[in-house]
């Protein structure tokens, strides 16, 4: 088998595959043998005994129930593995993936950005948070035996732990238009030390710092600065707070709230403020929203003061 | 014209078999109709569980009074066509024709009322892609609600229109003695079709007009 | 085995016995009352029971139309099976698709 | 049962009129079957040409023969044409139309005019699809996934969608006709448990056709409107859910797979009993298996969506249901095998096709288990493994059975005998060509080659070359029947009423049958396949 087993689940998947393959081969060989024996023995003109056999309920039930039990066994094994495949370990490190026709854009929490490449450390569970800017794509690394469709306007996740250093193919597996077959990349699994060095060499500006730059660039500070003349909510220490809303309800200012407040400001309006903020949907990419939210999470009175002293 | 002029087609043994086949065929067709509309209802259900508030907001923009009257009109028309089949079976021609005429008229009035609804919605800016002016928190979910609203009601109105035409043809033929107590299968089938159109509306009514009305 | 057709000719079939005039009119009355109930209940604050009541009433109305107006009560049993098949298949479609939408782990925000 | 010699056979349905008009306005189910036969044969070779282009392109890893755009359009056209214009109508609309009334002792289907109307719908739908091809084609894949098909594709999606929409009605009306025909027009004595399995299969297929096809039609309408107006319920920009489209699409398209394979199972049951000259083993189990497949087939569609963003729990439910539906398929294979036991087996061409079917169907069905197993499907879905799997079922299964059926009933349909030697040669060649084409694709899939790839990694080339070589052989073996069957129309020996000495009402009437099938309505006194040895 050419396909390497390079993730923590690959061997488990292959075990199930091989077991099922063995079972199926057994069935195929068995049935074919019986068919061939019958075909030879009872071919026209032989002197075989041909009194019509009786119909046996027992025979029918046997070959109904035995396959059923076997199938249920395979099903149970498969589900056990499936739940493992779909449940990321708690300590998995997040990496963000944004797919678009026809490239993979990857963003590490440290701000490192890559296109059509993904560097990961060996032995560390990685959790990919993926979304698409246009059509449905699918993130597929055969060597890891993992695949997950990447949908527009929604996040899907995928996790794996690379077990062998090396470079592996990354494919888009869901047909996504003209250059679908060129939407390929590589996943580079590196020993922990090498990975740390790689991170350092490619350290861009951290996500939060990128967000702070964007916050100015996009003109957010023009309204949300306490000294600005516009009556806009103060964002200091917003993260984790409970925000009273205009319709009388309350909302917890978690990441999702911040994310939606930027893209869909009119969805949940803070009490006491006019709904005057423009929507940034379609104006900034998903990766910029990520950066802005990362910045807002760090933005407390403390950091803001530091900012001013500088 | 009467039943003697309707020879049993070659593939059937006798009129009983022919009627059985026609009725079963119609019911099989109605089963496909249920699934035709069913896709839209399934789409409605799955979208509504994702945007319950937006659907309620969208529903509040529909005209509940007109919707209720439309439902009553269709229910009455269903009864009228059922009575007209009964009348033909009992040999009454004039009353049967009149009842069919009433059914068709009720169907047409349903279409007219719906036309008014569409016009009001156009003025309110509630037609996605054509004239949509809604803003606010629920605008997007409402747009999905209204997409479904138009798919469902237009597809239903298409069925009502076909039904009205069929009913007029049936009325004309009943008047001209095409059907009598012994042979009236086309009339029966038209009535079945009309009842199904009614049943679809029975479900459209609460799903489109009655969401989020309380309070 | 080619013996002559064994099936006797039957005369024109007129289908199930027509329901009585009163039966039809009472059904209409019941339908209109149910319509009123459904509109009225929608205006009361019942929470999820608004939807339950509305759909329950709709099912009742549909059953009335099916059994009385469409004569499923008196007609061939096969027709009842065909009609229920349509609704059953629709129920399957909605139920299994809902099984997905309702059990999806919300993952709207990537953190 | 025995053949009845008639001194002066009545005029056959082929002699009822010779002009084009007599064909295009016919209400005779047998002539309509032939009209369908001509249509699906034309579409089969058109779709085959598209497949040839795909296989040629894939001989080399680089995308050097045609552009990516052309390649995408080729596989889309191949899929659309083969699924809706060949496979779905293939056995039901040709063999089914021809044989269903004959097998139950009826003079025609219940609604002959509707039957002709279905054929016209099929042709009109086909013309839209051809127009789509001539104007530049469509590049969405036959699955029309949103939002690519609604918002992003720049090809003629509308024309293809309208074509498929129209042809959907054709199959709804065919299904409706079959259901009513089986219920009302059975000859005296033809009880349900005496129906040939082919009739049972047609009945089950008709059920699937009328209950699933409307869902496709409406879903495609939603796609068309969304494309036309730029808004719709699948639109992610509104918060709409593209996965919802997939639910609706597969609610039709998975049962559609059973529309393709159930008739094939029906045909093979006829062919194997004929070849082994035995009653089918376990008739009742075979019947229940057919019904079980048709019904449970509606409950498994989500196995196409394990990695599509469907919830983990829903996937588990769909997975177990998919395993369950494998049981009736297994029952059928075992019963066919057991039918050979103590038989009197002859290996004429129809029997060879049938045995080939059983072999290929097993390989296709068993690999379905890999795809039903969620954890394995993650790796295998959207790779060539899936492509190989469904070609084993639909081409290895359905097409083999269709051709076997065409050979078996050819004397009945045309009144002529074909060259047995050529027919056996074609059947054997087809079996080998098929395996050479598609078995390598299983390996490609397991090694991770995604489907619908215009260019691929060099490491996959060996298997792709083998597959393309096999496709050449397969192509030749598909052309052969066209030649020798065509030749038999003019030069073939006359067939008697019952050249196979087979049971079944269709063999009790002259070949080709007269306009209304039977001089007198037959009376049935025993179950099917009552072969005496």
Image: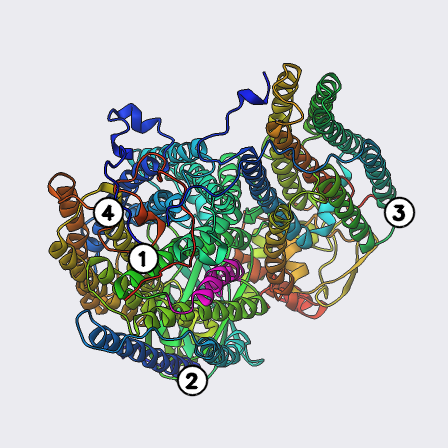
Q: Read off the residue under disc 4.
A: D410
Output the chain of dot 2.
A
Same subunit, tags 3 and 4: no
Instruction: Give the crowd class for mark 1: few <14, some 14-19, many >=20 residues within 10 Å.
Output: many
Q: Are marks 4 and 2 in contact (CB under 8 Å)?
A: no
Distance (Cα) linking label 4 and label 1: 44 Å
Element marked by disc 2: helix
Q: Nearer the viewer, mark 4 or mark 1?
A: 4
- Was residue B194 drawn as part of the magenta stretch in this picture? no
Output the chain of dot 4.
D
Numbered tag placed on residue C44 in the rendering? 3
Residue D480 on image: x %, y %: 15, 50
Q: Nearer the viewer, mark 2 or mark 1?
A: 1
Distance (Cα) linking label 2 and label 1: 32 Å
Q: Residue at x 49, y 51 (%)?
A: D208
Element marked by disc 3: loop
- Magenta span covers which residues? D280-309
Indicate whether B75 appears above or below C41: above
User: Left or right: A100 with respect to D400?
Assistant: right
Indicate whether D459 appears above or below D217: below
Instruction: Give the crowd class for mark 3: few <14, some 14-19, many >=20 residues within 10 Å.
Output: some
Distance (Cα) linking label 3 and label 4: 69 Å
């Amino acid at each position: 088998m050419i396909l390497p087993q390079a993730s923590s689940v690959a061997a488990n998947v292959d075990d199930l595959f091989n077991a099922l393959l063995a079972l199926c081969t057994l069935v195929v060989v068995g049935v074919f043998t019986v068919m061939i024996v019958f075909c030879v023995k009872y071919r026209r003109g032989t002197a075989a005994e041909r009194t019509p056999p009786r119909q046996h309920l027992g025979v029918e039930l046997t070959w109904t129930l035995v396959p059923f039990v076997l199938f249920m066994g395979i099903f149970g094994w498969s589900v056990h593995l499936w739940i493992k495949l779909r449940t990321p370990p708690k300590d998995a490190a997040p990496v963000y993936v944004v797919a678009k026709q026809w490239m993979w854009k990857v963003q590490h929490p440290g701000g490192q950005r890559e296109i059509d490449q993904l560097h990961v450390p060996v032995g560390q569970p990685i959790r990919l948070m993926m979304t698409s800017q246009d059509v449905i794509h699918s993130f597929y690394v055969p060597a890891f035996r993992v695949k997950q469709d990447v949908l527009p306007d929604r996040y899907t996740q995928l996790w794996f732990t690379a077990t062998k250093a090396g470079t592996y193919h990354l494919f888009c597996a869901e047909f996504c238009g003209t250059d679908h077959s060129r939407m390929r990349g590589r996943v580079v699994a590196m020993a922990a030390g090498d990975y740390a060095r790689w991170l350092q060499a490619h350290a861009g500006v951290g996500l939060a710092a990128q967000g702070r730059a964007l916050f100015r660039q996009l003109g957010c500070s023009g309204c949300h600065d306490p000294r600005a003349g516009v009556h806009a909510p103060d964002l200091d220490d917003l993260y984790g707070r409970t925000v009273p809303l205009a319709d009388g309800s309350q909302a917890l200012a978690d990441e999702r709230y911040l994310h939606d407040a930027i893209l869909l400001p009119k969805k949940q309006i803070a009490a006491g403020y006019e709904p005057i903020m423009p929507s940034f949907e379609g104006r900034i990419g998903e990766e910029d929203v990520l950066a802005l939210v990362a910045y807002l999470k760090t933005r407390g009175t403390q950091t803001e003061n530091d900012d001013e002293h500088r | 014209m009467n039943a003697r002029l309707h020879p049993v087609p070659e593939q059937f043994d006798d009129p009983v078999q022919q009627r059985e086949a026609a009725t079963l065929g119609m019911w099989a067709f109605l089963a496909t109709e249920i699934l035709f509309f069913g896709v839209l209802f399934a789409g409605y259900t799955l979208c509504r569980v994702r945007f319950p508030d937006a659907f309620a907001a969208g529903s509040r923009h529909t005209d509940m009074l007109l919707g209720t009257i439309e439902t009553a009109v269709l229910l009455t028309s269903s009864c009228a066509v059922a009575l007209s089949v009964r009348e033909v079976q009992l040999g009454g021609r004039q009353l049967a024709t009149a009842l069919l005429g009433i059914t068709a008229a009720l169907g047409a009035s349903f279409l007219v009322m719906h036309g008014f609804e569409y016009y009001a919605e156009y003025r309110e800016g509630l037609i996605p892609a054509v004239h949509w002016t809604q803003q606010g928190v629920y605008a997007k979910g409402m747009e999905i609600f209204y997409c479904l609203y138009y798919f469902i009601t237009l597809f239903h109105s298409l069925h009502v229109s076909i039904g009205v035409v069929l009913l007029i043809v049936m009325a004309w033929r009943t008047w001209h003695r095409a059907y009598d107590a012994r042979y009236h299968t086309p009339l029966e089938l038209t009535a079945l079709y009309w009842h199904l159109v009614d049943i679809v509306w029975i479900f459209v009514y609460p799903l489109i007009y009655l969401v989020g009305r309380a309070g | 085995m080619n013996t002559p057709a064994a099936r006797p000719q039957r005369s024109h079939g007129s289908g199930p016995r027509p329901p009585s005039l009163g039966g039809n009119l009472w059904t209409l009355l019941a339908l209109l009352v149910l319509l009123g109930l459904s509109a009225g209940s929608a205006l009361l604050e019942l929470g999820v029971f608004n939807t339950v009541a509305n759909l329950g009433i709709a099912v009742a109305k549909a059953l009335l139309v099916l059994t009385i107006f469409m004569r499923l009560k008196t007609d061939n049993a096969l027709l009842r099976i065909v009609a229920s098949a349509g609704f059953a298949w629709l129920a399957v479609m909605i139920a299994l698709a809902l099984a997905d939408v309702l059990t999806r782990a919300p993952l709207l925000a990537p953190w | 049962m025995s053949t009845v010699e008639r001194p002066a056979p009545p005029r056959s349905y082929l002699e009822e009129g010779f002009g084009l008009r007599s064909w295009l306005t016919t209400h005779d189910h047998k002539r309509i079957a032939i009209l369908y036969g001509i249509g699906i044969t034309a579409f089969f070779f058109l779709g085959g040409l598209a497949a040839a282009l795909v296989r040629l392109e894939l001989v080399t890893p680089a995308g050097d023969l045609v552009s990516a755009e052309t390649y995408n359009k080729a596989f889309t056209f191949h899929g659309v044409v083969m699924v809706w214009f060949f496979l779905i109508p293939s056995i039901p609309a040709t063999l089914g139309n021809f044989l269903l009334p004959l097998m139950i002792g009826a003079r025609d289907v219940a609604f002959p005019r509707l039957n002709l109307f279905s054929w016209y719908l099929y042709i009109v739908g086909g013309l839209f699809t051809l127009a789509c091809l001539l104007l530049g084609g469509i590049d969405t894949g036959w699955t029309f996934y949103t939002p690519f098909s609604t918002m992003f594709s720049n090809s003629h999606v509308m024309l293809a969608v309208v074509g498929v929409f129209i042809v959907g009605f054709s199959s709804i009306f065919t299904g409706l006709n079959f259901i009513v025909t089986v219920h009302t027009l059975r000859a005296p004595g033809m009880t349900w448990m005496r129906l040939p399995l082919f009739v049972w299969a047609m009945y089950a297929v008709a059920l699937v056709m009328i209950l699933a096809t409307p869902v496709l039609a409406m879903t495609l309408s939603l796609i068309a409107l969304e494309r036309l107006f730029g808004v719709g319920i699948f639109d992610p920009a509104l918060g709409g859910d593209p996965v919802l489209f997939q639910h609706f699409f597969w609610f039709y398209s998975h049962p559609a797979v059973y529309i393709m394979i159930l008739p094939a199972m029906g045909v093979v049951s006829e062919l194997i009993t004929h070849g082994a000259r035995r009653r089918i083993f376990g008739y009742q189990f075979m019947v229940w298996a057919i019904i079980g497949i048709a019904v449970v087939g509606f409950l498994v569609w989500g196995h196409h969506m394990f990695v599509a963003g469907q919830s983990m729990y829903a996937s588990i439910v769909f997975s177990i249901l998919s395993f369950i539906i494998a049981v009736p398929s297994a029952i059928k294979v075992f019963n066919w095998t057991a039918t050979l036991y103590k038989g009197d087996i002859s290996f004429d061409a129809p029997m060879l096709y049938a045995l080939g079917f059983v072999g290929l169907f097993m390989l296709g069905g068993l690999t379905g288990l890999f795809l039903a197993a969620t954890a394995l499907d993650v790796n295998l879905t959207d790779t060539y493994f899936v492509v190989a799997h469904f070609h084993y079922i639909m081409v290895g299964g359905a097409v083999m059975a269709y051709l076997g059926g065409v050979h078996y009933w050819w004397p009945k349909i045309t009144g002529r005998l074909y060259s047995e030697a050529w027919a056996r040669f074609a059947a054997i060649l087809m079996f080998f060509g098929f395996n050479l084409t598609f078995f390598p694709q299983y390996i490609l899939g397991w090694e991770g080659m995604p489907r619908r790839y215009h260019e691929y990694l060099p490491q996959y080339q060996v298997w792709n070359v083998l597959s393309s070589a096999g496709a050449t052989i397969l192509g030749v073996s598909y052309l052969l029947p066209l030649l020798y069957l065509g030749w038999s129309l003019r030069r073939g020996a006359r067939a008697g009423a019952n050249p196979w000495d087979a049971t079944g009402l269709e063999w009790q009437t002259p070949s080709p049958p007269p306009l209304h099938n039977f001089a007198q309505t037959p009376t049935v006194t025993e179950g099917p396949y009552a072969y005496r040895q």
